[in-house]
Amino acid sequence: MNIWVVSGCSSGLGRTWTESIINERKEIVIGITRSEASAEEMVSLYSERFIPCIADVRDEKSLKEQLTALAHQIGTPNRVVTCAGYAQFGTLEDLSNQQLREQFETNIEGTLNVIRPLLPLMRTLEEARILLVSSMSGVACWPLLGAYQMSKYAIEALGETMRLELEDTPIQIGIIEPGPHKTGWATVSAKRQKVSDYYDEEALKSRVSCGFQVEDPTASLPFFWHMFDQTQMPLRIATSKPFVDMVCEKSMENMQLLRGSFEQL
């Protein structure tokens, strides 16, 4: 039986995936959440299959201590999913450096704070997998989401680099790029900076809407399980076919522009 670590387990996609792991696969989840109330609720719902780890992913020391202790108590996790994160809205001109740092502290440093303490333990296993949660915003850009997009582009680089660095170990790395889901990431979970008068705020907001269908979080489950059920973990998967089509078309355009610029020299 697999033992999982899921950060951001109490809401959004993290909650949906945690419930699927527990209810459908009957496996154990060590769930990282900042909320004691959410942890208590999930323990009451899932009993011994949910082990709470109450911590902020930015707290490197606490995470290391708790995850190491839980691994020795329950068993070494062989499945890790890094869902914790949030979106900071605002133009890059209006956002402060502190806001950018906070975005990266949660989305990037927080991801590494979950993974690093577990790597030495996971190396002793026959097989282990880590799924990094990126986004459509890790491969495409829209206005007002610069900070978030920068952090998700960094997740893409983090995942690709770690996959190369761990290729001679039992640990496989994959990246999932969720499309829009009804998770509250752009509402209750988001932070917003007032847009200055230099900009047409309504025009920018209209361009933030990507136009793709907003799916129920459960629609992500086939893509999530694909990353864990294949013999070889894919490098990445996106959860929206229209988005994949758009990115592939844009990539071809970018390649042609790059080649054209070079050939003009």
Image: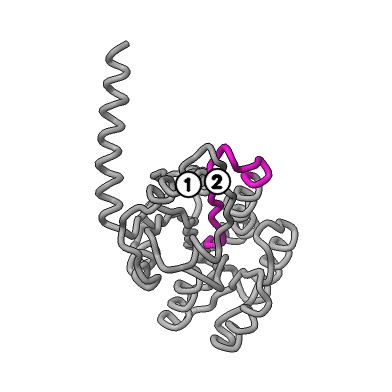
Q: Which residues are magenta?
A: 82-100
The answer to whether residue 166 is visible is no
Question: What is the number of the mark on residue 201?
Answer: 1
Q: Position of residue 73 (x, y in %)?
A: 67, 75
Q: Position of residue 190 (x, y in %)?
A: 55, 59
Mark 2 crowd level (few <14, some 14–19, many ≥20, 10 Å Cα): some
Q: Is residue 168 above or below residue 55?
A: above
What's the residue type where badge 2 is placed? Val
C-alpha distance separating marks 2 and 1: 6 Å
The answer to whether residue 241 is visible is yes
| SS for dot 1 | helix
Report if the CB atoms under discs 2 and 1 are less than 8 Å apart: yes
Residue 210 placement, left or right of 18: left
What's the residue type where badge 1 is placed? Glu
- Could you say which is closer to the camera, residue 124 or residue 11? 11
Residue at figure coordinates x 68%, y 44% from the top left: 98
Residue 234 placement, left or right of 49: left
Residue at figure coordinates x 59%, y 50% from the top left: 193
Q: Is residue 84 above or below residue 151?
A: below
Q: Is residue 37 above or below residue 57?
A: below
Residue hosting label 2: 195
